[in-house]
């Protein structure tokens, strides 16, 4: 097991502060778990475990998107806590996903609370808009964004640094069957997330690519996923040029000679 130092705890809080702003504004999409986990692993001094947890967590959240007022589990806290738990307690990435999910749900409820609480600012925003007071309008938006960002940072610091002893003790005290249950749940979550993504994006014309990728991964011994990525890139390039050729070969609408003469005469 590893101990998170005070500097690492503050660094993680600063990271989540920035990512919280990005998630609130949906600006650069740095809040995706694969990026969050990798950056968290870099702060902890183990990028390798950050990449592993990032890949699994990203698959778990691949198909989870906000729909109206419904918010999925928070991807930032899921990424941070999955990596922190895997690094500090020594459990594998699949078990860490299951253990990190409650922290993700906690942040989800906090964000939902802000969505409701910030509705109190709507009347003030309407007045600012009516009076064309852009300065007050900008300050109000900046204030709410900073409230969210500081909440992210405080919760991340409490969960990663102050609660690490209790978290390690909890993992140690868990019986083997419960740890195995978290491992199984963590292994299923990436498949569920990817399945949700396929449910939205899947088309019948892409079934051969899915079968080819499945056979390549399951029945060909490869040391890493780089060959799979190269194969997927090849399929993507082929599909791109194939679609481009089809669009160019489609017949263009033509005008008859009489219409051309009418247009030339200004009619």
Image (tube, rainbow, N blue to C red):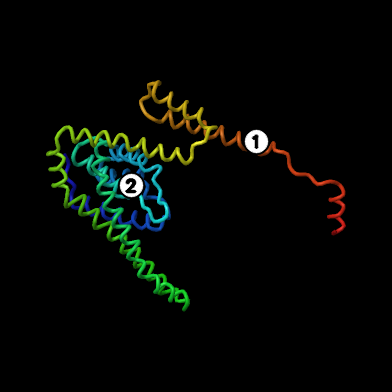
Q: Is residue 62 left or right of residue 178?
A: right
Instruction: Tell me, for residue 246, which label it has, or none.
Output: 1
CB-based contact (under 8 Å), mark 1 and mark 2? no
Q: Is residue 226 above or below residue 44?
A: above
Q: Position of residue 125 (x, y in %)?
A: 41, 72
Q: Is residue 188 above or below residue 111?
A: above
Pick the quarter of the image with the N terminus.
top left
Label 1 and label 2: CA atoms lie apart by 40 Å
Which structural element holds mark 2? helix
Q: Position of residue 108 (x, y in %)?
A: 31, 53
Q: Is residue 179 above or below residue 150?
A: above
Pick out the residue farthest to the bottom. Answer: 131
Q: Is residue 169 left or right of residue 230?
A: left
Image point (37%, 53%), residue name: 70
Which residue is the site of mark 2? Answer: 36
**How many labels, in total?**
2
Q: Earlier in the sequence, mark 1 or mark 2?
A: 2
Q: Position of residue 82 (x, y in %)?
A: 26, 43
Pick the quarter of the image with the C terminus.
bottom right
Point out the frontmost of discs 1 and 2.
1
Quarter of the image where one finds residue 101: top left
Image point (15%, 43%), residue name: 168
Image point (17%, 41%), residue name: 2
Crowding around mark 2 (Cα neighbors within 10 Å: few <14, some 14 to 19, many 20+) is many
Crowding around mark 1 (Cα neighbors within 10 Å: few <14, some 14 to 19, many 20+) is few
Viewer-proximal residue among 220 and 41: 220
Which structural element holds mark 1? helix
Quarter of the image where one finds residue 45: top left
Q: Position of residue 134 (x, y in %)?
A: 45, 73
Instruction: Tell me, for residue 206, which label it has, or none.
Output: none
């Amino acid at each position: 097991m590893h101990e998170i130092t005070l500097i690492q705890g503050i660094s993680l809080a600063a990271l989540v502060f920035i990512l919280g702003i990005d998630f609130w504004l949906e600006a650069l999409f740095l809040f995706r778990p694969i990026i969050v986990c990798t950056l968290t692993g870099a702060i902890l001094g183990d990028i390798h475990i950050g990449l592993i947890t990032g890949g699994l967590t990203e698959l778990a959240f691949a198909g989870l998107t906000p729909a109206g007022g419904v918010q999925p589990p928070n991807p930032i806290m899921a990424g941070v806590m999955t990596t922190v738990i895997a690094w500090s307690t020594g459990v594998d990435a699949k078990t860490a996903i299951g253990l990190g999910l409650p922290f993700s749900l906690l942040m989800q409820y906090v964000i939902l609370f802000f969505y409701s609480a910030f509705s109190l600012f709507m009347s003030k925003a309407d007045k600012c808009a009516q009076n064309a007071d852009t300065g007050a309008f900008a300050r109000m938006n900046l204030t709410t964004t900073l409230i969210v960002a500081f909440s992210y940072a405080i919760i991340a610091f409490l969960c990663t640094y102050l609660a690490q002893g209790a978290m390690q003790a909890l993992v140690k005290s868990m019986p083997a069957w419960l740890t195995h249950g978290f491992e199984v749940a963590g292994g299923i979550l990436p498949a569920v997330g990817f399945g949700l993504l396929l449910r939205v994006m899947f088309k019948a014309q892409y079934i051969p690519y899915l079968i080819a990728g499945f056979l390549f991964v399951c029945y060909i011994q490869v040391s890493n996923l780089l060959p799979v990525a190269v194969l997927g890139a090849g399929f993507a390039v082929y599909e791109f040029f194939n679609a481009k050729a089809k669009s160019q070969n489609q017949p263009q609408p033509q005008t008859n000679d009489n219409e051309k003469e009418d247009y030339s005469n200004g009619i």
